[in-house]
Amino acid sequence: MTARLEARAVRKAYRSGRGTVTVALDELSLSVADGEFVSIVGPSGCGKTTFLNCVAGLESYDGGSLVLDGRPIAGPGVERAVVFQDPSLLPWRSTFDNVGYGMALQRRVPAAARERRVRELIEFVGLTGFERHYPGELSGGMRQRVNLARALATEPELLLMDEPFGALDAQTREQLQVELARIWQAGRVTVLFVTHDIEEAIFLSDRVVTMTGRPGTVRSVLDVDLPRPRDPTVKRSAGFVALEEHIWGLLHSPAPARVP
Ligand SMILES: Nc1ncnc2c1ncn2[C@@H]1O[C@H](COP(=O)(O)OP(=O)(O)O)[C@@H](O)[C@H]1O
Ligand SMILES: [Mg+2]
C-alpha cells in the first residue's frame, strides 16, 4: 500500500502575546496508508487536536513535513473533511440542506445527482424520515450523524475526526461507533481518528497510535489484529482486553527518555 498521509518530524509551537512559547508537537512522525483507519490516543493537552488541525490545514506547523498523496499540506482542501466533537451544522438549515451544503458549494455535482446522493447518505447514517428536521429538533447523536453525512458528502479522501463522539452518552456512542465502522468498511475512506477513549480506538482501528504528554510525539504504534466486521461484543474478548491494558499501561507510565 502507498502511504496516503506522511508526517515527518512535525513540530508546532504556539506563541502567546506575552511571548510565552508552548511546544505542542515535537518530532511527530506517522504515516497512514490508503484506506486505513488509524486512531490517536493520548493524555489531554498532548497535542492531538493540534496535529489533526495541522493535517486539516487549519493550523500551520513550524517544522518537519506533512505530505498528503505526495503533495505538501499548505492549507485546507476539499480532499479532507473534518468532524469535530461539536457538530458544525447550520441551525437554520434542515438535515437535507446541511448534508448537501458542501456539495452545493463545490458545484461539481449537478442538482439532481446531488439530491440523490444526499438521500443515500441520509439513509446511510440512519436518518431517513428526518430530512426536513432542523438541528435543534434532533438529539446529539442524530446531529453527529448529520455531521458525519455532511463530511462524507464531499467524498473526502481523508476523513479527520476529533473526539466526534466525546459528548454523547455511552449507548449512543457505541451505536455510532458501530455505524462508523460499517461506513468505513463500505466506503473505505481513509480515517484519522482522535480520541482519549482506548476502547473506542481499538474497536474502530487498524492501528492505534499512542502519544506522549506535551510536547506530543508518537510513543508507540500498535496493530489491532481483530477480525472485521467487529461487533461490540469483541470488546470483551481476551485479545481486545489485553491490547486495552497494554495501551492503558503506556498512557499511564512515563515515556522513556528521548534520545537527544
Ligand atoms: N491556540 C492555542 N494557543 C496556545 N496554546 C494552545 C493553542 N491550542 C492548543 N494549545 C496548547 O497546545 C497543547 C496541545 O493542545 P491540544 O492540541 O488541544 O491537545 P489535545 O487535543 O491532545 O487535548 C496544550 O498545552 C494547549 O494548551
Ligand atoms: Mg483535543
Image (cartoon, grey):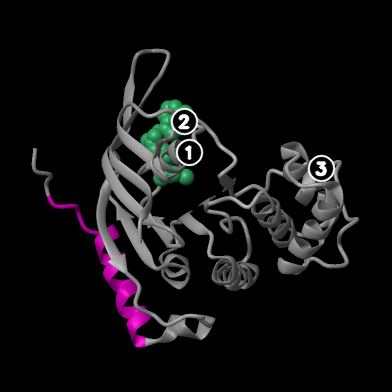
Q: Earlier in the sequence, mark 2 or mark 1?
A: 1
**Residue indicated by mark 1:** 53
Question: Quick check: 49 above or below 146?
Answer: above
Residue 200, given in percent of the width and then of the height, sits at 47, 67
Question: In the image, is residue 109 part of the stretch drawn in magenta?
Answer: no
Residue kind at label 3, given as amino acid type: Pro
Query: Cβ–Cβ below 8 Å for labels 2 and 1?
Result: yes
Three-letter amino acid code at the position of disc 1? Asn
Q: Which labelled disc corresponds to residue 226?
A: none
Which region is colored magenta? Answer: 238-256
Viewer can see residue 115: yes
Q: Dot 1: what SS?
A: helix
Proximity of marks 2 and 3: CB atoms separated by less than 8 Å: no
Q: Amino acid at mark 2?
A: Glu
- Earlier in the chain: of badge 3 and badge 1, it is 1
The residue that mark 3 highlights is: 91
Front-lying residue, 4 or 125: 4
Question: Which residue is at the front of the view, 8 or 113?
Answer: 113
Residue at mark 2: 59
Q: In the depicted view, which residue is nearer to us: 126 or 156?
A: 156
Position of residue 119 in the picture relative to residue 108 (left or right): right
Label 1 CB sits under 8 Å from any ligand 1 atom: yes
> Is the C terminus in the top left, top right, bottom left or bottom right quadrant?
top left
| Residue 15 as seen in the image, left or right of residue 145 | left
Q: Quadrant of residue 242?
A: bottom left
Local crowd at mark 1 within 10 Å, few (<14), some, or many (≥20)? some
- Nearer-N-terminus badge (2/3): 2
